[in-house]
Amino acid sequence: MTEPLVVRGRLVQPSAVVDDGVVVASGGRVTFAGSMAEAAAAGLGPDVDRVPPAPGTYVLPGLVDLHNHGGGGASFPDAGSADEAMAGVLEHRRHGTTTLLASLVTAQPDVLLRRAAVLAELATAGEIEGIHAEGPFLSHRRRGAHNPADLQEGSVDLVRDLVRAARGSLRTMTVAPEVPGVTGPGGVAEALTAAGVLPSLGHTDGSTEQAEALIEQVTAALAGGTRGPMTATHLFNGMRPLHHRVPGPIAACLAAAARGDMVVELIGDGVHLDAATVRSVFGMVGADHVALVTDAMAAAGVADGRYELGPMSVEVREGVARVVTEAQAAPEEGPIAGGTAHLVDVVRCAVRGGVPLVDAVRSATVVPAGVLGLAGEVGTLVPGARADVLVTDADLRPVRVLRHGVDVAVGSDAVDIDVAGA
């Protein structure tokens, strides 16, 4: 009989850290998670005693990333085959992200459909949880790294074509509420929720009222379901800034998150947001309404240089990715074009910036899993959950990764980010 898998260390649970904790798994599922004393009381002494204490390590659930465009040199929006895209999946998996959505960017409809079909192969194989479509129904003014020529008004026909191409694996789609055809009866938001896809509010120059209208419509449509709430795509980035006389969409998103109608994504990598902003949002809405994300692109885990993000050229310098256009005088003037960190790096950055460890971990595990309707399955270490485990050193750098209870080769190229104010 095969011995159960045992992992020991400082166990990070949703509300506390167990100093001498242990996770036991068998058949790819967690059978026990708790303190050594609890394990002994449960009769697990012979199994767990053989594993020495590991006070210098943390044991976390496998991380869950809702917004990821690639890594390791592979770009999901540009992958022509499942094998190409898989290189990006593995780059993040070996750094502890055991569940992720592969994100597309705005492109011509035929390109979107082809890329969705490619990524659907990975979803069917269980390598990714599904697909996130970022665009093309976005604000021209707040488009960020999205190609302006490919932006368009809301199209229910394109939504339906994309759902078909993704073969049931389209999970979320970023939309701007002010774009014609997005909100209201017969619009994109209605078509998405009817197809089981979560609308995500983002890349918007809309007003507070326009954002509120979309949030209200989606919240009503999701009532009583097992997925959600809806999300805000990388709050603050790609949005009209918050102003006390013209509050815009950010005010509506914060209010919705505070009352439980929204989960706000934060790219807490030290580049997209100041540490104080991340810390303040956690304080305002609570960790249960925040999802830490990477918005990673192909350069995550590899060297600076020139990359492609869909139809846009991107220059990465000192780990910061920016769009390159003929009009700009220097690469540092272009808009930020995604992240280059892994999700464990974002967690570390948030903690260094003042977010409590248990809160940062919860927002990278339990919360995004709940958005996907996977509560109790991934992003948690409880009996019956998938045995996805991330073991880190005391500085939250990966030393071991398990997915389905099987060891994954661990990456050591963690991104060390300087955090303002940390």
Image: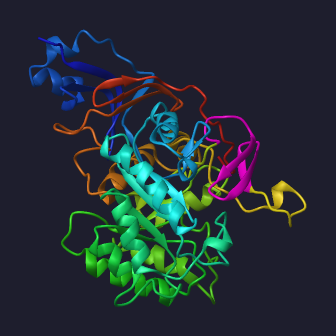
Does 105 appear in magenta? no
Does 312 appear in magenta? yes
Q: Is residue 342 above or below residue 3?
A: below
Total marks in image: 0
Where is residue 172 drawn, in percent x and y? Answer: 40, 63
Where is residue 132 drawn, in percent x and y? Answer: 44, 59
As rendered, which of 349 and 30 lies closer to the eye?
Answer: 30
- Judged left or right of residue 5, residue 284 is right
Q: Is residue 43 above or below residue 291?
A: above
As rendered, which of 98 and 298 lies closer to the eye?
Answer: 298
Residue range corresponding to the magenta coloring? 299-322
Q: Quadrant of residue 331?
A: bottom right
Q: Quadrant of residue 19?
A: top left
- Judged left or right of residue 334, residue 373 is left
Where is residue 309 drawn, in percent x and y? Answer: 64, 54
Say whether residue 103 is visible. Answer: yes
Please report the residue visible at 18 percent of the width from the left and 13 percent of the height from the top: 3
Please report the residue visible at 38 percent of the width from the left and 79 percent of the height from the top: 189
Q: Is residue 411 above or below residue 256?
A: above
Name of the residue lying farthest toward the right: 329
As rendered, which of 60 and 26 lies closer to the eye?
Answer: 26
As rendered, which of 196 and 217 lies closer to the eye?
Answer: 196
